[in-house]
Image (cartoon, helix red, strand yellow):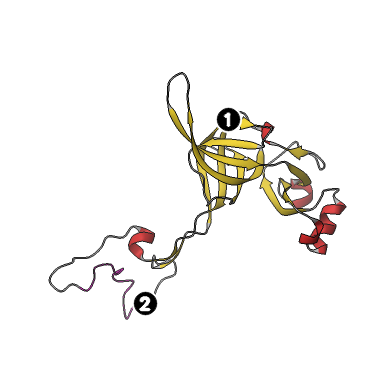
Amino acid sequence: MKGIVGRKLGMTQVFDEETGAVTPVTVIQAGPCPVVAVRTEEADGYDAVQLAYDEVPERKLTKPKLGYLTKHDVGPHRRLIEIRGQTELTPGETVTVESFEPGDPVKVSGVSIGKGFAGTIKRHNFSRGPTSHGSHNIRKPGSIGASATPSRVFKGMRMAGHMGAKRVTQVGLRVHSVDPEENLLLVKGAVPGPRNAIVEVREEIRGGS
């Protein structure tokens, strides 16, 4: 499983000089990510690789976190992220954008943009009620359950509430180009999260995980 951690810089367009086609791409500044630890099915019960990202001064880390990184011969980094799947990486190696090539199918995970408190029409795509003849059900959710039986509202009922700001994985993406000098990945299409959001880029195995 190939994977890397990066920061979403924003979106732009790439023009093809020959055909004039315009491709919308998301620019991700990914890596370099030192390999801190490798989890195995035999020792840990699952396969994964733990990567460090976002190098910072030592004073910005807690002593336990700094001690853990020092124990594994890794400099101070703000984030530790595990990417599930079997890997051939070993502790001490560094993952860079060069592990990806143009055309590679990838999926990108991140925390979506928060929309705040939203009603059911915006949050769940409900239809509105009638707007004439004294109707009081224009943007209300309508009935949320029976009265006497079961005398409660079932869990998971779609209602108004906080919208966005949750982990989302966008699948079906492809790497457009790679810039090793600037540690940039250009991915075709949009990925979750606002500008400067932390995202995980993983290879997508069709029909698998």
On whether residue 65 falls in the magenta region, the answer is: no
Element carrying mark 1? strand
Q: Visible in this render: residue 1?
A: no
Whole-percent x, y for residue 8 in the image: 58, 46
- Report the disc number at residue 150: 2
**Magenta-highlighted stretch: main secondary structure?**
loop
* Mark-to-mark CA distance, 2 and 1: 56 Å
Q: Please report the residue visible at 82 percent of the width from the left and 48 percent of the height from the top.
A: 74
What mark, if any, has residue 1 been given in the picture? none
Q: For the N terminus, give its image quadrant.
A: top right
**Residue 184 % position (x, y):** 63, 37
Q: Residue furthest top?
A: 18
Q: In front: 155, or 142?
A: 142
Q: Amino acid at mark 2?
A: Pro
Dot 2, crowdedness within 10 Å: few (<14), some or many (≥20)? few
Determine which quarter of the picture holds residue 159.
bottom left
State the residue in front, 15 or 169.
15
Query: Does residue 140 lie above or below 71 as drawn?
Result: below
Residue 103 or residue 44, whichever sits in front:
103
- Of labels 2 and 1, the one closer to you: 1
Nearer-N-terminus badge (2/1)? 2
Q: State the mark number for residue 177.
A: 1
Q: Residue at x 49, y 56 (%)?
A: 113
Neighbourhood count class around disc 1 (C-alpha, 10 Å): few under 14, some 14–19, many 20 upward? some
Mark 2 element type: loop
Amino acid carrying mark 1 in the image: Ser
Q: Is residue 174 visible?
A: yes
Residue at (29%, 70%) from the top-left corner? 140
Residue 151 within the segment the image draws in magenta:
yes
Magenta residues (range):
136-152
Residue 161, given in percent of the width and then of the height, sits at: 43, 68
In the image, taking residue 111 as reference, residue 125 lies left or right, namely: left
